[in-house]
């Protein structure tokens, strides 16, 4: 069975996550984007990162985040969050997560997150298992852009 490569879900922007201007607080974007990705992994790939950590003693830790804010997400707005694995290696993953308005005509934010597979008992990085590498091989959707800055530049001028 062919795996979906771009995963998508909707959520509503909540009051407690907004600033005095009723815009989603810049730090809150991370929670919305990462939470959506975690839910999408469970729903589409049957990969629960918390269950995986409990059963294997291994999970992913954030190495870096790069984010750009293009348009504000506002109080009680429904947004679409889509995500894709754009690169992977023996110990790492690179994921792009995008936030859109409900009709996906306005891009609000783009996040690149790099994750390192980590052995929670040894407190050191770990190589992905063969079954994980197989999943990544079937799920990855690389981008033509090789840097975050190049990607954002292209997205700014792309017609949606």
Image (cartoon, helix red, strand yellow):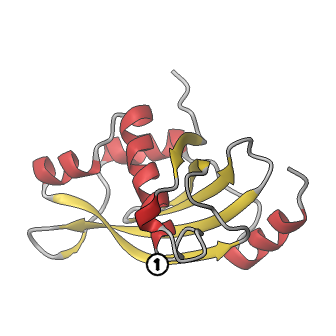
* 149 over 58 or under it: above or below: below
Of residues 4 and 70, the one drawn nearer to the viewer in this rendering: 70
Q: How many discs mark residues in the rendered view?
A: 1
Mark 1 residue element:
strand
Circle 1: is it few (<14), some (14-19), or many (20+) Cα within 10 Å? few
Q: Is residue 68 left or right of residue 104?
A: left
Percent coordinates x, y for residue 121 in the rendering? 8, 68
Percent coordinates x, y for residue 97 in the rendering? 57, 58
Of residues 81 and 64, the one drawn nearer to the viewer in this rendering: 81
Q: Residue at x 55, y 68 (%)?
A: 24
Q: Which residue is labeled 1 in the image? A: 64
Q: Residue at x 20, y 76 (%)?
A: 124
Q: Where is residue 4, by image quadrant?
A: top right
Q: Residue at x 69, y 62 (%)?
A: 108
Query: Which residue is situated farthest in the top direction here?
Result: 1
Q: Where is residue 2, by image quadrant?
A: top right
Q: Residue at x 73, y 78 (%)?
A: 149
Of residues 48 and 139, the one drawn nearer to the viewer in this rendering: 48
Percent coordinates x, y for residue 109 in the rendering? 65, 65
Percent coordinates x, y for residue 136 in the rendering? 46, 46
Q: Is residue 92 left or right of residue 13?
A: left
Query: Which residue is situated farthest in the left direction here?
Result: 121
């Amino acid at each position: 069975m062919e795996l979906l490569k771009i995963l998508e879900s909707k959520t509503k922007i909540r009051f407690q996550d907004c600033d005095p201007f009723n815009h989603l607080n810049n730090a809150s974007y991370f929670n919305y984007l990462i939470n959506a990705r975690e839910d999408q992994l469970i729903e589409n790939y049957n990969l629960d990162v918390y269950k995986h950590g409990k059963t294997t003693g291994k999970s992913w830790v954030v190495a870096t985040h790069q984010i750009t804010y293009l348009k504000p997400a506002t109080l009680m707005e429904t947004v679409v969050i889509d995500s894709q694995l754009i690169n992977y290696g023996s110990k790492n993953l690179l994921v792009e997560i995008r936030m859109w308005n409900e009709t996906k005509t306005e891009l609000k934010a783009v996040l690149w997150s790099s994750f390192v597979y980590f052995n929670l008992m040894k407190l050191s990085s770990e190589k992905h298992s063969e079954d994980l590498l197989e999943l990544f091989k079937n799920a990855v959707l690389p981008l033509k852009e090789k840097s975050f800055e190049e990607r954002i530049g292209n997205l700014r001028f792309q017609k949606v």
